[in-house]
Amino acid sequence: MTAKERFYVTTPIYYPSDNLHIGHAYTTTVADSLARWHRFAGRDVYFVTGSDEHGQKIQRAAEAKGVTPKEYVDVIVASFKELWAKLNVEYDDFIRTTDERHHRAVQAVFQKIYAKGDIYKSAYEGWYCTPCETFWLENRLVEGNCPDCGRPVELVQEESYFFRLSKYADRLLQYIEEHPEFIQPETRRNEMVNFIKSGLEDLCVSRTTFNWGIPVPMAEGHVIYVWFDALTNYLTALGYPEPNEKLEKWWPADLHLVGKEIMRFHTIVWPIMLMALDLPLPKTVFGHGWLLFDSEKMSKSKGNVVDPMLLIEEFGVDPIRYFLLREISFGQDGNFSRRALIERTNADLANDLGNLLNRTLSMLNRYFAGVVPQPAAAPNAVDQDLIDYARSLGPKVDSLVKELKINEALASIWRLVGKANKYVDERAPWNLAKQENKDELGTVMYNLLETLRIVALLVKSFIPETGAKIWAQLGLEGIGEKSLADTAWGLLEPGTQTRKGDPIFPRIEVEKEEAPKEQPKQPKVEKAEPAQPEGVLIGIEDFMKCELVVAEVLEAAPVKGADRLLKLQVDVGAEKRQIVAGIAQHYKPEELVGRRIIVVKNLKPAKLRGELSQGMLLAATAPDGRLEVVSVSAAIPAGSRVK
Ligand code: MSP
């Protein structure tokens, strides 16, 4: 038997200087979803998070409150754990840097590197940013402030221990070059390479002007620099320094998930510490983007933080998890707003998924007394299209998750949900019931229920409560034991008694106090055709003047400087065309690729923001202002006339 693939994933350990905000919840939700997915896919998973409790920032915060640092952090760390429980985050270990086991690990690391001659004593004179716990050379400051957070820095003059980063610079550069998967995404790799090439100074790794930290083993009065201390947590979780099975099994880590602002520590300081310890480097450090609020990074000092606990209480946990995972292109910055959260929840969870479950089970109650029927009739082309997509989805989501394309993975699952909703309309079970065509009706209902079963399995790593709720309404048990292999088509047993319940996502009413939603503006074309006055009847010959055809979307991309426009390359039947459409606020480019949409082929070409548009796509507007592009199944070839 081959050994199980393994996956060791970590989040940063957060500072308990204050409560966590939705930005912190973002990293941890991603890590939890990855851990759950890999487990579901049959891999052995170890998921570690924790709290970074030492340092000057915490000591000062505690002093300001008149309590000891330990008393101060104990309260906040308890709130971290409460948040993770509310968010359904299931970690395997939680490292507190005040744990005894962590002290041992950090002192052992310090001692080993010192014994090797890579830590030495000298005098430090330079600048320090306490909120970031970062040393800065004068020439890196921006207008005398911290180049990362813009806040004032303090002059530090101390006798300190230094870590020879400079000695390892070339070796690290070579490693990065030979292991392109080590620093991701690529833009961050380039930033890090440039940073190293601009020259690495030895790093000050001890402080003497405060005492809230782990003592330097060979010198009284010195505490170990908080980042040197914190990074070691990834080894503490494996029982370092004692040689043991855990360390053997799990090191090197597969993935350190971190925000982009702490990439330098994770891709320069940490790997050099590991090189000095003769340990292998983590396989990947992924630097994700920030959650922005009004285009600014969310942070306590800017006063624009959003409390995830309150959001969970108000909306429930899965809308928050879904929003974070789906809305933000992993690796890039993304905006948070209540409105976007409500719109996402209403569109994807209430309308698309919730409604599919609800209408399917209502019809099943009506036509089959809620019991899963036999798929007695052979599938036709429309059935087969749904079955083929559903069948291929498990492995597809697995590859997307492995590539850390989490939002794309969710988009591909929602494509199945969309297909199933369209399938209901196309196969119109109510007509089959009228015709008393029980065999075909049975097949259609079975296909819908089986799709929902597969969807429940595919979503459960990302939105665990929803997966379980769908499963229960389908009358099934034991979703926790199911694996990726169970997403194969046809495992739903005919004869199962379903249990329709309340809608899993009631629609959220947009608050009255909010400004009315901006209607999607139609892109301005250079010469608009006069609109047909309403109520005027046209003859068929007028309608036939409009050449509507099926077009396959080959590529889709944003238009520079136009946040409403997408540029599509489409195949209209042996001819490639470019179409520019005002749908960027409703679709991500990747959601459109592969779709067969309907376009007006004989519309006069126009230029939109300098881009040629050779046709127009059809779309309908939902009552909430959301646009839905009209499309047909893959059974209809590109170029087919629509009339
Ligand atoms: N204690 C260090 C990490 C040590 S890891 C060995 C630290 N802690 S922190 O509390 O400031 O949390 C930083 C992490 O929180 C970021 O790396 C990122 O993962 C997350 N985020 C904080 N604000 C964020 C946003 N606004 N958006 C997304 N992630 C954010 O740095």
Image (spheres, rainbow, N blue to C red):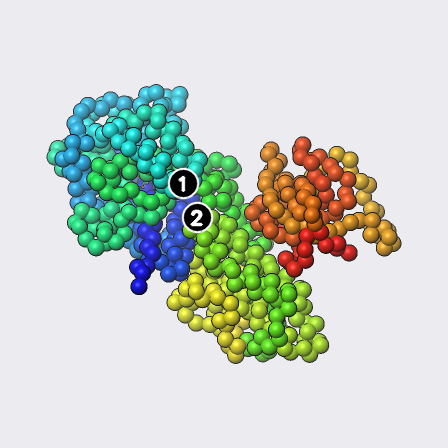
Residue at point 67% right, 47% down?
571
Amino acid at pointer 1: Gln
Instruction: Mark 1: give few (<14), some (14-19) or many (20+) Cα within 10 Å.
Output: some
Give the quadrant of the C terminus: bottom right
- Labelled disc at residue 21: none
Residue 70 on image: x %, y %: 23, 44
Q: Is residue 47 visible?
A: no
Residue with the mark numbered 2:
404
Asked whether 343 or 552 is in front, the reply is 552
Asked whether 16 or 546 is in front, the reply is 546
- Labelled disc at residue 184: 1
Instruction: Mark 2: give few (<14), some (14-19) or many (20+) Cα within 10 Å.
Output: some
Residue at point 40% right, 46% down?
27
Residue 521 on image: x %, y %: 68, 41
Q: Quadrant of ligand 1?
A: top left
Instruction: Give the residue furthest to the front.
Output: 574
Marks 1 and 2 in Cβ contact (< 8 Å): yes
